[in-house]
């Protein structure tokens, strides 16, 4: 996943949920947070996999 993709997806999903609930500001903010968290999680998983391969 390229850098920033998680944030972009988070904004898109946040805007969609925000439009449905009538609270766009809250959901775009939450979408950004969830997008960053998703990106970080995948980055750590990839890093751990590379470390495990290096030890074998």
Image (cartoon, rainbow, N blue to C red):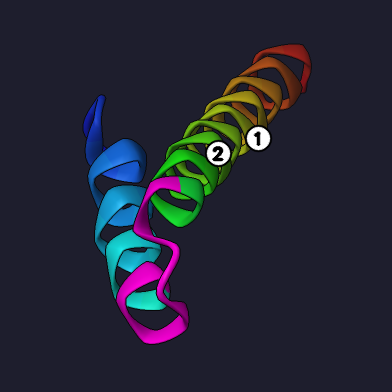
Residue extending furthest bottom?
A: 20
Q: Quadrant of the C terminus?
A: top right
- Is the magenta region chiefly helix, strand or loop? helix
Q: Is residue 46 left or right of residue 35?
A: right
Q: Return the x and y of residue 48 as percentages of the image width and height.
A: 71, 24
Q: Nearer the viewer, residue 53 or 43?
A: 43
Q: Quadrant of the N terminus?
A: top left
Could you tell me which secondary element the residue under label 2 belongs to? helix
Q: Nearer the viewer, residue 32 or 6?
A: 32
The residue that mark 1 highlights is 45
Q: Check disc 1: other Cα within 10 Å, few if <14, some if 14-19, many if 20+.
A: few
> In the rendered structure, does residue 45 fall within the stretch colored magenta?
no
Looking at the image, which residue is at 24% across and 29% down? 4
Q: Nearer the viewer, residue 35 or 25?
A: 25
Residue extending furthest front?
A: 22
Looking at the image, which residue is at 53% across and 27% down? 43
> In the rendered structure, does residue 20 fall within the stretch colored magenta?
yes
Q: Return the x and y of residue 50 as percentages of the image width and height.
A: 59, 22
The residue that mark 2 highlights is 42
The span from disc 2 to disc 1 (Cα, nearest Å) is 5 Å
Could you tell me which secondary element the residue under label 1 belongs to? helix
Q: Which residues are magenta?
A: 18-25
Q: Check disc 2: other Cα within 10 Å, few if <14, some if 14-19, many if 20+.
A: few
Q: Return the x and y of residue 7 as percentages of the image width and height.
A: 33, 38
């Amino acid at each position: 996943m390229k850098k920033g993709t998680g944030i972009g997806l988070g904004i898109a999903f946040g805007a969609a949920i925000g439009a449905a609930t009538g609270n766009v500001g809250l959901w775009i903010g939450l979408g950004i947070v969830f997008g960053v968290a998703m990106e970080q999680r995948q980055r750590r998983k990839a890093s751990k996999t590379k470390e495990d391969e290096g030890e074998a």
